[in-house]
Amino acid sequence: MNILQINPRDNVSVVLEPVRTAGRLVDFGHKIALKDIPAGDEVIKYGCPIGRASIDIKAGEWVHTHNVVTGLGGGRRFYEYMPAFAPRTPRESGVFMGFKRHGGKIGIRNEIWIIPTVGCVNDIGRVVAQKARGLITGGVEGVYCFPHPYGCSQLGEDQDNTIKALSGLIKHPNAGGALVLGLGCENCGISIIKGALGDIDGRRVKFLNCQDEQDEIEAALRLLGELFSAAGQDAREPVPASELIVGLKCGGSDGFSGITANPLAGALSDRLIDEGGSAILTEVPEMFGAETILMNRCKNEAVFQKTVLLIENFKEYYERHGQPVFENPSPGNKAGGITTLEDKALGCTQKAGTAAVSDVLPYGGSLKEKGVNLLQAPGNDLVASTALAVSGAHLILFTTGRGTPFGAPVPTVKISSNTPLYNKKRNWIDFDAGPLASGASLEALADELYEYVIKLASGEVLTKTEQNGMREIAVFKNGVTL
């Protein structure tokens, strides 16, 4: 029987190809019991509990949602800081060809971004972007509009989140220039955005209120021409890989995600951090059940306390809305073999490798500390990926066992957890981690992924989402709409 026991402590194994056992066909990625597990006993995977048996489970039986329940419970939990990380060995930084920006930031693309302040002007932005693509000159690599439904009729935290998200995108170094497109009467208008932006390069950021113009499309194209002139002079130059910031995200996970794709992303993260670079891990609800692993990797007590608040505040967010804290995994996750939130979290957190956690960022916060950073954002693919870009990620390593076509504002590298997905959806998937399930070397595959990332950052290759023209944003919403 082709199965994998991940950790010697495990009492379940993962099926590597469909097998018939105990009179049932069990699909690949799912689990079977290695020994009898009495009702109430812990089910162990990755060497950690992923839940408890809800009924007696016999050796060889399928282990899934029909006979396992989560071991997580509600209420606040007491956490104790027990540091569990080793000093890492620095390594010489690689080099990529990037763009040096205002304020010392580095970009890996030289694009022009149109950022609507309010959903009312989304279609104007789309039309302008389409017309402008025929006018691109010099070294500009594309022009893109990022529509969203917000920017007006919002209050408090929701308006703050919209301002943070839009401001972060406007100042993102992958944009050689940005056109901020307003309506003129919204409560998240241009004057508000200007106040949030702080110091900017006026040659690279332009503003337009559509209500102020007789022909707003003509006016927008004129401003874009100025942005093309400025950004068109930019050229790539050597930059150390220590300047790279990689976002870490998974979506549509399956039973292989924690065995192949997520550990591969973690190995890449570790290598980049050893070279002085940075990685950002988000999806806070998908840390539940594995949060102590991250807490014990915090570099000091202060970062540990920030991580505790990150976890507890997100639990309170669910409870405040009367929703179950542990309503996860998704239907697609379950179909792929993930049984409980602990099962998902123990795989999800592997994307951050083994390096110490350097800092915790609020939603919309910019990266300040090199190394692994944790970011406040939900699990939703579009919202979390946008949050990673807003916080400064140059690119996102997006692991998946189910497949998804969507792309964030920054290059979004889709890494398949299993080879059948890679073979089926090559128009979506950039890199296959599936060989790890068959004994391929993690170090060798991580080297291959690293070389791909360097080429991607240098503009030598484009992700499938870039090739397909797929770019989207979504802002984190919490409260009421007027």
Image: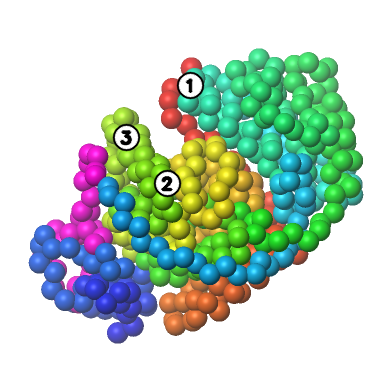
Badge 2 local density, few (<14 within 10 Å), some, or many (20+)?
some
Q: Quadrant of residue 225?
A: top right
Mark drawn on residue 316: 3
In the rendered view, tell whether residue 278 sits above or below residue 20: above
Identify the residue position indicated by label 2 in the image.
Answer: 303
Across and down, in percent, residue 97 comes to 77, 61
Residue at image position (36%, 39%) is: 309
Label 2 secondary element: helix
Across and down, in percent, residue 229 comes to 89, 41
Q: Are marks 1 and 3 in contact (CB under 8 Å)?
A: no
Label whose residue precedes the other's in the sequence (3 or 2):
2
Residue at image position (81%, 31%) is: 202
Residue at image position (29%, 34%) is: 319
Label 3 secondary element: helix
Q: Which residues are magenta?
A: 49-78
Q: Amino acid at mark 2?
A: Val
The chief SS type of the magenta part is loop
- Horizontal side of 146 relative to 402 (left or right) equals right
> Whole-Å distance between the Cαs marked 1 and 3?
18 Å
